[in-house]
Image (cartoon, coloured by chain):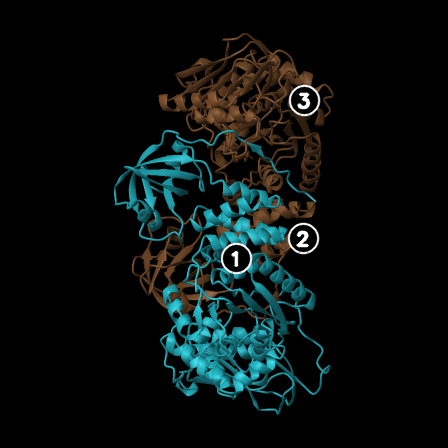
Chain colours: A cyan, B brown
Amino acid sequence: MFKRPLITLPIAVILLGCGGLEFRVRLLEIEAGGKPIAVMGEGDARRLGVKSSDRVLIRLGDSEATAILNIASEFPEGVLGAYRELRAKLKLVEGAQIQVEPIGRPESLSYIREKILGERLTPWKIDRIVQDVVEQHLSDVELAAFVTALQIHGMSMEEVEALSWAMVKRGRTLNLGRHPILDKHSVGGVPGDKTTLLVVPIIAASGYTIPKTSSRAITSPAGTADRMEPLCPVDLRLEEILRVVEEVNACIVWGGALDLAPADDLFIRVEYPLSIDPLLLPSIMAKKKAMGSTHMVVDIPTGRGAKIKTMDQAQQLAMDFIELGRRLGIVVECAITEGDQPIGRAVGPALEAREALEALMGNGPPDLIDKAASLAGILFRMFGDENGKEKALSILNSGRALEKMREIIGAQGGDPDVRPEDIPIGERVHEMRADRGGRVLWIDNSAIAQIARAAGAPSDKGAGLILNAKMGDEVDRGDVILRIHAESPQRLEWASSLARSLEPMGIGERVGERMLIREIRAVTPLGPEFILER
Amino acid sequence: MFKRPLITLPIAVILLGCGGLEFRVRLLEIEAGGKPIAVMGEGDARRLGVKSSDRVLIRLGDSEATAILNIASEFPEGVLGAYRELRAKLKLVEGAQIQVEPIGRPESLSYIREKILGERLTPWKIDRIVQDVVEQHLSDVELAAFVTALQIHGMSMEEVEALSWAMVKRGRTLNLGRHPILDKHSVGGVPGDKTTLLVVPIIAASGYTIPKTSSRAITSPAGTADRMEPLCPVDLRLEEILRVVEEVNACIVWGGALDLAPADDLFIRVEYPLSIDPLLLPSIMAKKKAMGSTHMVVDIPTGRGAKIKTMDQAQQLAMDFIELGRRLGIVVECAITEGDQPIGRAVGPALEAREALEALMGNGPPDLIDKAASLAGILFRMFGDENGKEKALSILNSGRALEKMREIIGAQGGDPDVRPEDIPIGERVHEMRADRGGRVLWIDNSAIAQIARAAGAPSDKGAGLILNAKMGDEVDRGDVILRIHAESPQRLEWASSLARSLEPMGIGERVGERMLIREIRAVTPLGPEFILER
């Protein structure tokens, strides 16, 4: 194994206060993705003794700002290009005279390097990294290296805890002045999982407080925020959430714009292209802590087609959630749930909102009802209700959960009297039929998700699909097994042709009849599928 | 240890041929660092179902190009911003109507991900990665993740070999139609190492061919190309090199613009900010192979102050060089050399050029002479000259090496009759004096390098420093031990104050008298020093 020895010679002084050079500002009418990036030509960079990614201090009168340098091969001499972020920071105008001088790299960069070398980081060092991430002092290259190193080396529980605290510290928090505050989280990965839309009203109907923040889909057809949005606005400000929860004990909102853990959004930007997710645990828990959660159930869907594949993985993740919760002062219990097929029948924002509302009205698919009651039951049991699941079912069956959901919808600015059929769904429909009779032996979550996304979900709210059969159901040849909904003919065509080329559902006479799961050809045009939803 | 299980679900189809959206082009008057980057607003990205870093296919009439997408929060709807690279690729004009549709990620990205997961990559996969690097299909985030993964996991010799071949394949090569072709390389890290300026003319004077390409300094005060430049032009094109070597059997040129291993420049761009260098071995050897080298001596300076710290590290690196050479068809021998103090007395381009010329004229410092003769001797010995070192010394002493050097200088377009005193050096001088008498016990390479860089080296050719004493020399209190040369008063002041705050030279009565090497304070404002020179 050839592994380069790493060379570290701590130096005694960071070169500060070097005489800089004068530049004229050129405003670049574009953002640099949040980072204060400045651009200069190669000649100027040589004169200043700097390279791409080096840091410079920019002085304009009494104000100054740090920038990360990009070097361009064609750029006029004596001119410094300023992206919008830098322009805003220093209130720069076109042609302004500024002084530019090289400065040392942020301290956190050496801690990132330590992590690359496989060292454990102290809480203090992790805090400095998170601070520099949030303040945009690190380039994407540096962030990518950090996230990659975390993925490869892993983190000790001490590091995970420190990262969680650092993320909470650098973000906003919600103070409801109540206790206890309940929460529910799913690690995701199963299409059509609208369980939250039942659990929250069940819990709140029994008098508990549950301010639920959710994500929008990144790689899936719908996140919980996307599912709630056909019913009412979900992009509430923190002050509005406070009011809603005061009023009705609960909310179901989009957590993404609340600045609960701003570092996380910046990490996700580099995790997404790499399809890695080493920060799952601290990211989730930091946001829960920021919302003031004290008791929480974590749903870990497990199965071949889910994000978590094996019981061992699920068990380990559960233990980590519980331990991190303990360290953050949150009582956590986990539920390992069936993840081999979609929950219920609907996949896609509006179709799922309809299905959830129908379930609250007493007409829900059995798997959705059972899952919601089980998770709510675990929360009830934390407070002494040994028959938590029965309690949840009775709240659901009594209509009190529906009533509570209507209160939440109203408080968030939606129509409390909304009926399932009021929610618009994609009117372009393609029906996929069984090419043989038999039993549904398996459903391919990944294919289902791709077809729904091809149809337009989640950005087209009405797009998605309905499964007319679930695992174990009997179908006849020619029966409709899948109904695709789209908002445009183009999207419908695209989703339909994808549905034909994939095999979303396996039908056979009996289990064991069709043992081939997937054929691997010599050259496989495959990319990894990756689920990034928090 | 908390380590996220990684989720891979190969998908059956990469979403191609989705109906795209129409955009108008806005030309951004700036480069994106070589990559074909396009920018669109958040709303458009949502409509198209894409995220930052996703790839899109851009169509303009019959031509099309792939771009990497950046998402901007403030960007007009229906407009696609095109950096210069993309504009050039598609010959875009302002306001042009184009079609944009999402496409899958490059295949090489899944191989990068495999490397992150710790897998060995096949030669074919490595070749695809290098191809996509050279063709700029990978973002900086993806490149950074790859380089970080290589640093952490290391590479098998098979991978190193494949990477070397892939780099050669994607670059230009020099075909001299001669055999053998000799070469010399130093892994670097010792200031003032102008050995190449002696070895090349010694070898060429005896009739061998040695087309030497060198680097410019990245983190050091001078690379060999910087040292040669005060004597003659070094940025020759490949055709010119061919002519020079035909004429005089040798050259000493800058290899950076020859496109010998274009992947390397792109890797260096992300390695530099991270201060990691996992590609040292394949990068160096790919460039040697591209120059057609058949026999090569590799200098590995070793010592506390050098890039390689221990004999074990040096030994391992030497074995790797030899083995990789064998696989590439290059006979390699290595020399582990003293790396604890600068070579000779001069540090900085012009000062070193003077010293090298003086050495060729018979007036060189003993360490420089010995090192050059030893390395040249190893090359001679490869061809049967058992007394290679003596042969080298006799060529040097006879003046034949000087004569050859003047031929090389002339052939490259310099003044063949140049005298040392013709080479301009920085006229601003600061003398640092010994604050006590005694022996020089140690010299801090890192401090020397920093002081020389502070004085302006390598961009100010005349800047640098002269060591008036080397390890073991006796000095009296008040003797000049260091003379700093700069081209501007500002740089001189900066370098002088740095020299005062660092301790570049340790003076004491006898070895063992001053045992403290470095004091570590509670809060250390230290960054890692890092040597990146190939």
In the image, B363 versus A97, the foreground residue is A97
Neighbor class of circle 2 (other Cα within 10 Å; few <14, some 14-19, many 20+) is some
> Which of the two marks, 3 or 1, is nearer to us in this view?
1
- Mark positioned earlier in the residue sequence (3 or 2): 2
Which residue in the structure is indicated by mark 3?
B377
Q: Amino acid at mark 2?
A: Arg
Q: Secondary structure at mark 1?
A: helix
Residue B95: % across, % down? 29, 60
Residue B169 appears in the picture as rendered = no
Above or below, B327 relative to A436: above
Q: Amino acid at mark 1?
A: Glu
- A489, above or below B431, in the image: below
Alpha carbon distance from label 1 to label 2: 22 Å
Chain ID, mark 3: B
Mark 1 vs mark 2, foreground winner is 1
- In the image, is residue A465 above or below residue A29? below
Question: Disc 1 designates what residue?
Answer: A271
**Residue sitting nearer the eye, A64 or A51:** A64
Q: Disc number at residue B120?
A: 2
The amino acid type, in three-letter code, at marker 3 is Gly
Quadrant of the image containing the N terminus of chain A:
top right
Instruction: Residue A429: give x, y in percent of width and height.
Output: 46, 85
Return the x and y of residue A269 as percentages of the image width and height: 47, 57
- Which residue is rendered at x = 48% and y = 29% of the image? A13
Disc 3 on helix, strand or loop? Answer: helix
Residue A468 percent across, percent down from the top left: 55, 86
Question: Chain for mark 1?
Answer: A
Distance, label 3 to label 1, CA atoms, is 52 Å
